Each structure stands twice: as C-alpha cells, then as structure tokens.
Image (cartoon, grey):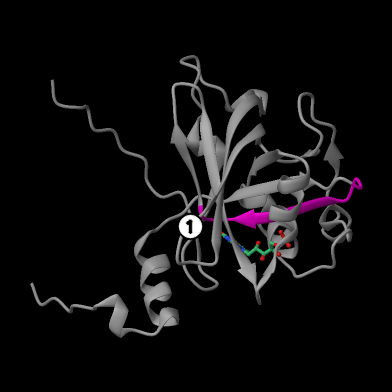
C-alpha cells in the first residue's frame, strides 16, 4: 500500500485536527440540553460524544473553548451538573444545525430552532420532544483534556426516553427505524448505511 505519514507535531494544529475528525468517522451526535443556575436553557450538538462505560450506562461529550471563552454547555453543567443527550435523526438535522449557532447566553436554541421542549423527570434540563431517544444524565466528572482546549463532561444515564416503535423485543433500538445522523468532518454528515450481522467467534 502506498501510505503517507504525518507527524502531528510537524503539522499545523488545524491540519492535524482535520485528519483526526475525518479519520474518526462516522461520529454519533449528542444533542445536549443543559440549564444554568439562572434557568437559562441551552441546546447544542456535540460529535465528540460516546458511550464510555457500563453496565451502568455512562456517556461523555467533549466541549471546546470558543475563542478562549467557555461554551454555554460547559458553563451550565458547572452550575447545574445535569444534561439531556438527545439523539438526532434525519428529521431533526436542520434544527440540530441551527442550534450549533453562536447564540448569546440565555438565548434559547429551542426557540431559535422552533423546537418543543418536554420536561425531564430526574434532571432539570428539558429534552427535545421530537428526539427519538433522549437520555437524562447526571454529570459525575468534568475533566479537562490536558494540552487541549477541550473539557470532557462525563455522566451517568439515569433515564432513557425511547419512542415506542423503536424498541425491539430484545430491548435494543432498531437502527433502521432510528435513522440516526452522524457527523463526518467539515459540513459533511452521513446516514446509516447497510446493516449486516457478524457473529462473534466462539
Ligand atoms: C454536528 C456538530 C457537532 C459538533 N460537535 C462539537 C463537539 O464535539 N465539541 C464542541 O465543542 N463543539 C461541537 N460543535 C459546535 C457546537 O455545537 C457549538 O459551538 C455550539 O454553539 C455549542 O456552544 P454553546 O454550548 O455555547 O451553545 C458541533 C457542531 C455541530 C453542528
């Protein structure tokens, strides 16, 4: 194979970042709803998002600084250590994109994007009513990623909201019905492709 090699320290951070986010693909999108001490609600998408622990379900998002300033999502979880991570499906992608805009603190992305909010049960931030799956999360750790402008927000999922038609008999979510949208790099996104099965070796 004709391979190219890149030493990240010899690259501009921007070029190295572009290789990172176009190599780690497709990334799921955690659409995070948070609330500040003053009741300001924020909603923003994060593709540095994943499940990070089990069997008790733990998830994380990683939030960068914006021109040195902390983003509303991080500010909110520092004030109220809770969030709702909503799943983005194909129907919600335009509204998700609107909520990634750089709106002033206290300016509700729910209103900006014309999204209805439903109250959560165990946490204060509301969930996106139209999201096919929403996870109510108690934040357990806020971890700066050393040498970067990122901070990981880790938390325990205390409640799942799942649209009834998505749940299969074995307790999992049907990916074909879920129609999740994934982030690639730049402005590129992906739908779920063909689903195939591969039994694990005995
Ligand atoms: C699909 C998508 C994924 C994103 N992923 C991240 C991410 O993982 N980390 C991050 O800091 N910003 C990410 N952003 C940008 C944030 O959504 C954006 O900065 C947003 O305004 C968050 O700021 P706020 O918390 O101040 O509302 C992403 C944007 C989009 C559209």
Q: Which x, y percent locates residue 72? A: 75, 58
In front here: 147 or 176?
A: 147
**Left or right of residue 188: residue 118:** right
188 in the magenta segment: no
Residue at point 46%, 54% (across, down):
27
Residue 180 vertical position relative to residue 75 in the rendered view, above or below: above
Q: Position of residue 139 (x, y in %)?
A: 64, 37
Q: State how many labels appear.
A: 1
Q: Which percent across, then down, holds residue 120?
A: 79, 30
Q: Residue at the spot x=82%, y=34% of the render?
A: 124
Q: Which residues are magenta?
A: 38-48
In the drawing, does residue 27 fall left or right of residue 165? left
Name the quadrant containing residue 107. bottom right
Residue sitting at 68 percent across and 47 percent down? Answer: 32
Which quadrant is the N terminus positioned in?
bottom left
- Residue visible at 64% across and 24% down in the picture: 158
> As drawn, which residue projects farthest toward the left?
1
Image x and y of residue 64, in percent: 59, 64
In the picture of the structure, the residue carrying the numbered disc 1 is 145
Q: Quadrant of ligand 1?
A: bottom right
Specify the farthest residue to the top: 169
The local crowd at label 1, few if under 14, some if 14 to 19, many if 20 or more residues have their Cα within 10 Å, is few
Between 73 and 43, the residue placed more toward the observer is 73
Left or right of 59, for residue 55: left
């Amino acid at each position: 194979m004709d391979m190219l090699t890149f030493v990240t320290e010899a690259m501009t951070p921007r070029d190295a970042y572009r290789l990172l986010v176009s190599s780690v693909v497709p990334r799921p999108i955690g659409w995070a709803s948070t609330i500040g001490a003053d009741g300001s609600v924020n909603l923003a998408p994060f593709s540095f998002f994943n499940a990070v622990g089990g069997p008790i379900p733990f998830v994380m998002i990683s939030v960068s600084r914006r021109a040195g300033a902390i983003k509303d999502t991080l500010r909110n979880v520092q004030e109220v250590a809770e969030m709702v991570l909503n799943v983005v499906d194909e129907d919600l992608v335009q509204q998700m994109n609107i909520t990634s805009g750089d709106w002033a603190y206290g300016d509700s992305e729910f209103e900006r994007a014309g999204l209805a909010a439903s109250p959560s049960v165990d946490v204060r931030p509301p969930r996106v009513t139209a999201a096919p799956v929403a996870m109510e999360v108690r934040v357990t750790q806020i971890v700066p990623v050393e040498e970067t402008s990122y901070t990981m927000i880790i938390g325990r999922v205390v409640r799942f909201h799942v649209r009834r038609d998505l749940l299969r008999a074995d307790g999992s979510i049907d990916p074909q019905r879920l129609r999740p949208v994934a982030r690639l790099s730049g402005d590129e996104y992906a739908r779920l492709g063909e689903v195939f099965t591969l039994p694990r070796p005995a």
